[in-house]
Amino acid sequence: MPREGSPPLIDEHDVTQPSSREAAAAAAFMTSVPVRARERRRAKATAALALLVLAVLGLASYEFVAKAGHTQRAASAPHPRVQGPMIPAGTPTAAVSPAAAGPATASPASTAPASTAPASTTAASTPPPRVLTVTSVAAFGPGGTADGNNPQNVAQAVAGDPAAPWYTDWYASPDFFDMAPGTGLLLDMGQTVTVTSVDVSLGGEPGASLQLRAGSEPALAALPTVAGVSGAGGTVQLRPSAPVRVRYVLIWFTTLPPDPAGTYQASVYQVTVHGRP
């Protein structure tokens, strides 16, 4: 209803149109609503980011402290020591063997079994030398058994009787007066054997030079020298530098010792062959 005293058009305008103050307040209210919403979202995002940063920093701090503590414990832990055996007082140090003292470190060489070494296996499986049986003995010269000295008494060379030895022929000079390169005794072992040494017992005066020759055939050229001695007297041992596998063994005189008659002559009363069958 139009107000009294007011023109009808003005009254209608006043009723239907808000005042400028009301419009401004409404506009201000509508503008502030989205601004506050954005600020709330921004605050929430900032808080979430801050929480994430704090979580990362806390995890990093925990890892750092844990590693530092582990390093400190490892550095302060005592080092293990190898305990050796108890040695009574007064015991010399040299009397304790390396095996009893215990290995300080394990090396590849010390861990390998000794039984696997080829040399140890060979030594363990090889029997020791023993006295071998001589099948036969013969006087032997440069031409073989046909021109040996005193063949009729050759068995006395291995009889072991110093009073009844085998003698060579006598000669006017120790080198057979250039009549022969030597003379000796041929031992037939009956089969191929391993010879490690030969003991020869000489009678008479010292001064003999003799060779140990060995081979598979009873011929001087087929019996190479494997050992020798000079100026010999009494019992001498002829030992090859390495064991030899042979059937025939030759005791070969190249120089004769002097005899009581002023000539030169050798005598043998025992020959012993050592080895393995």
Image: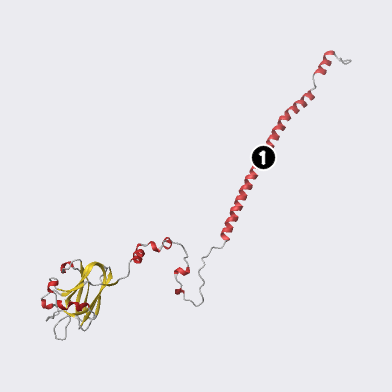
Closer to the camera in the image, 197 or 104: 197
Picture mark count: 1
Residue appearing at x 11%, y 78% in the figure: 177
Give the labeled residue for mark 1. 48
* Residue 268, position as x, y percentages in the image: 20, 79
Left or right: 2 in relation to 270: right
Classify mark 1: residues with Cα within 10 Å, few (<14), some (14-19) or many (20+). few
Residue appearing at x 64%, y 45% in the figure: 55
Looking at the picture, which amino acid does disc 1 mark?
Answer: Ala
Residue appearing at x 84%, y 16% in the figure: 11
Is 10 above or below relative to 24? above
**Residue 140 quadrant:** bottom left
Residue that sits furthest to the top in the current view: 8
Is 213 above or below relative to 48? below
Name the colouring of the figure: secondary structure
Residue that sits furthest to the bottom in the current view: 260
* Residue 72, position as x, y percentages in the image: 58, 58
